Amino acid sequence: MLSDVAVIGLGQFGTQLAVSLAEAGVPVLAIDSRMERVEGVRASVARVLCLNSTDEDALAAARIADVGVAVCAIGDDVQASILTVALLRQLGVPRIVARSTSQLHGRILRMVGATDIVNPAQDIAMRLAARLLQPGLVDRVPIAPGYALNEIEAPPWTSGRTIAQLDVRRAFGISILAVKRGSTTGEQVIANPGADTAIAQADVLVVLGDDNAIARFLAGR
């Protein structure tokens, strides 16, 4: 599990991130300069602080260097996000994840100390484009250029066949990592499915492979 995480900037993105991490059992320190935003998550996270993240003394007093990960989720003030990341680096935070609003912003954030860059709007747009371009694709997480972890609707031609019969690694060069199956009691996840696991018509498959191989698998050729 993650060690303590500080989330700085409690807009829609930062708030959702802080609450989701806390629900997963991660100790979260939520920070914002607006008291109403801080109060909005107080009941959901381990600790909250109302402070200006561009104030080095305030960050130091908050013992920000003690967290394992700091996420700068500021999205409405580019200058503040850059200065915040620089201060986090200066104060010794080991891993700094920063939200960017453009490619240039992302490059600058890396230059001043961010170890990871996220661009929520760009990521959502790219994933939606992939879903629209590839029928049957539920979700896609890029891992490397042309290579991704995909959630796909089980193609009709796979229904009733077992993992062994499909032999997708040999036929397509992909791996089925999990099978997600709905039931009357909720969703069932079959992780690392065995060779005798049979695919049902409404299953969703978690598949690792390159884009061309995934497209061929969906088409059954």
Image: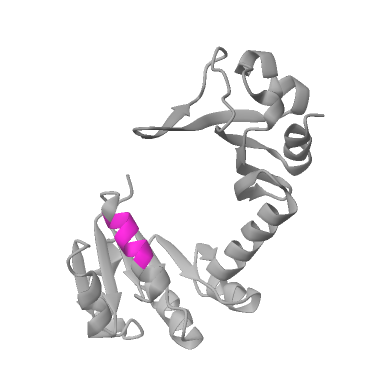
* Residue at (38, 70) in percent of width and height: 14
Dividing the image into 4 quarters, which one contains the C terminus?
Answer: top right
Q: Please, which residue is most extreme toward the front here?
A: 184
Residue 83, given in percent of the width and then of the height, sits at: 44, 82
Above or below residue 152? Residue 128 is below
Q: Which image quadrant for residue 168? A: top right
Above or below residue 66? Residue 152 is above
Q: Which image quadrant for residue 149? A: top right
* Residue at (67, 43) in percent of width and height: 136
Q: Is residue 89 visible?
A: no
Prevailing secondary structure of the magenta residues: helix
Bounds of the magenta segment: 16-22
Q: Is residue 165 visible?
A: yes
Residue 148, given in percent of the width and then of the height, sits at: 65, 44
Drawn side of residue 123 relative to residue 169, left or right: left
Drawn side of residue 211 relative to residue 203, left or right: right
Is 21 magenta? The answer is yes
Above or below residue 48? Residue 128 is above
